[in-house]
Image: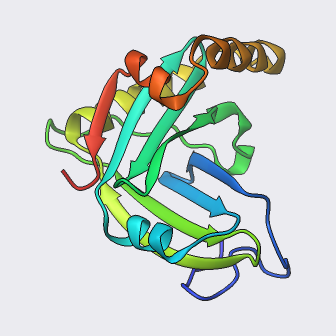
Amino acid sequence: MHALEVGKPYIAGRASIEPRGEYNFRGGQHELVLAFSGLDSREVEAVREDDAEFALVVSGDAIFFLYRFGDEIGWSDAPYSWHLVPADQREQPEMPANVETRALLSIVLVDADHNIVQALRAVTFSPEFTRKLHAAIRHQAGRPWNRAVYDRELREAYKRWPTTESMLRAEIARTLGGA
């Protein structure tokens, strides 16, 4: 992966990218990519400076990474599966060495309309959130993979929780970034 810089393309050679919120754990790193269409300065400021809050929901073999930034960017979710990470980037997260270990999350905000990085931020998870997220990923990685089952679990979860706010009722962990 190339080094990211504010004001530079997120993906070289592309004029735009698909809008999305995507959480990944790959190559031993936690990453949240927020690619927004019609991005405005308030959203950029929220990602750079506002409280970043994260929650974790596990439903069957589906992991949902929930996030919000201040009052400007409300709760949203990003489903995750270790099995969908390219094989050469798959690593199981290590279980924390001690009770105070905190994982680091890199956040990348991209203007999807122009494929330009608008903000970069790094925050840590609380020790408890780190332990629960790493345990969920390790559990998922150790289970047999069936894409049809995973897709069904996603559909059922979104029926059960039609909004991210409703999904919060099933959270198993929540943290402020850097807390």
Vertical order, 103 against 94 (above or below): below
Q: Where does residue 71 sit, x and y in percent of width and height?
A: 36, 53
Q: Give the residue drawn at x 41%, y 24%.
A: 168
Q: Is residue 85 left or right of residue 172?
A: right
Q: Based on the displayed image, in which of its 4 quarters is residue 67 positioned?
A: top left
Up the image or down, 109 lies above or below 64; here it is below
Q: Nearer the viewer, residue 3 or 93?
A: 3
Query: Horizontal placement of 117 versus 92: left or right?
Result: right
Question: Residue 63 location, x and y as percent?
Answer: 55, 27
Side (left or right) of 89 relative to 115: left
Is 58 situated above or below 107?
above
**Residue 179, image x, y percentages:** 18, 50
Query: Dividing the picture into quarters, in which one does residue 159 lie?
Result: top right
Q: Residue at x 65, y 62 (%)?
A: 36
On-image quarter of the N terminus: bottom right
**How are the colours assigned in the image?**
rainbow
Q: Which residue sits at x=77%, y=20%?
A: 151
Residue at image position (42%, 57%) is: 72
Task: Please count the marks in the image.
Answer: 0
Q: Which residue is outermost to the bottom? A: 7
Residue 95 percent location from the top left of the image = 33, 34
Q: Quadrant of residue 104?
A: bottom left
Please state which of residues 30 and 171 is positioned toward the viewer in this rendering. 171
